[in-house]
Amino acid sequence: MYYLQELQENAGIFSPGMEKEYIFPLSANKFRVNILAMGSVGSSLLTGLVLLGGDIIHSIGIFDIKQNVLNRYEAEMNQVAGGCFPKTEIIESEDGLFGCDVFLFCAAKEVPELTSGVNDVRMAQYAENKILIEHYAKIAAAKSFGGLFAVVSDPVDPLCKTAYLTSGLNPGQFRGFGLGVMNGRALYYARKEKKYSRYVDEGRVFGPHGEDLVVADSILNYDDDISRELTEKVVTENIRIRRMGFKPFIAPAISSGAVSVLRMLRGEWHYSSNFIGTGREGAFFGALNRITERKCEFETDPLPAQLFERIEHAYENLKKID
């Protein structure tokens, strides 16, 4: 049997070679969260955080190049009544983006149109979004940002690496949120089709938010054929939604974004990507994890050889993306 820590022996909230250990300061206090860009994903993520995060978030800053969009969401979010909701505030300029505990990168230069015929929509956005995130990573470095730089835009994992390498900040300060929706999609099919049903209680997802995703129908009684079949359904679900005539952003914004970010802040188990390796030779890789007072803790369940080989293959492919 294999264990995930064999792949991530140099991973987690601390990477060897860094001058000091970075531990995200979870505490009983509420957090300040800033969101860059109020497009489809950013605005949906904001809605989720407002509705679900009153216990752990005291305020949310929003920034976008369109002032009328900011004015709209500042008004509408602060008109949500009937509970304990975080206050939504407009950030007046880029200089204020990193005055927070958690920065959420939701910007996207261009999302392929429904008629584009592009299948791997996530990687199609990489070149343009890479330029964008480099810009904000440099600002984070200039501000000596000490909080968490979270990436929600596609492709999540390569963009995390770009931001880390560009900024020169500690790799533990970067975390990708794309895997939560893959878990949600696997659960969707597991509840619809009996042959996938073991996933509900025993399944896991690993790796990137994209083609090399690894879905395991069960980590207790792994079936490679069923798992690969379920993986294909999950990876291509965004294409199925696009063929309906819609861009699939609601489930990603809520499952990968709002729900996963809030679970992270509460110190709960959640899906996110963390750095494994050293410098350019490493990669951000997704798995179930949680932040404790001392470290980033990963599951220690034994994994069958066939599953571990898939996980290792996905990690090696992620390392090659530059």
Image: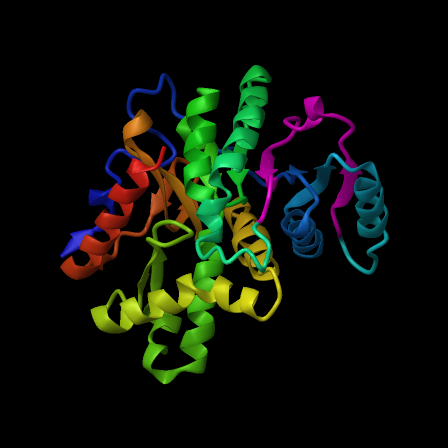
Q: How many marks?
A: 0
Q: How far across and down, in percent of the image, does residue 140 sit?
A: 57, 23
Residue at 44 percent across and 79 percent down: it is 191
Check the picture and name the quadrant holding the N terminus.
bottom left
With respect to residue 21, does 291 lie above or below? Answer: below
Q: Is residue 82 left or right of residue 56?
A: right
Q: How far across and down, in percent of the image, does residue 183 sit?
A: 43, 62
Residue 193 seen in this snapshot: yes
Front-lying residue, 191 or 72: 72
Q: Which residues are magenta?
A: 85-111
Residue at the front extreme?
A: 116
Q: Is residue 224 left or right of residue 76?
A: left
Q: Is residue 218 left or right of residue 89?
A: left
Residue at 71 percent across and 40 percent down: it is 60
With respect to residue 195, does 13 lie above or below? Answer: above
Residue 221 seen in this snapshot: no
Residue at the bottom extreme?
A: 194
Look at the image and say whether residue 48 sits in the magenta stretch. Answer: no
Check the picture and name the quadrant holding the C terminus.
top left
Where residue 252 sits, quadrant-wise, is bottom right
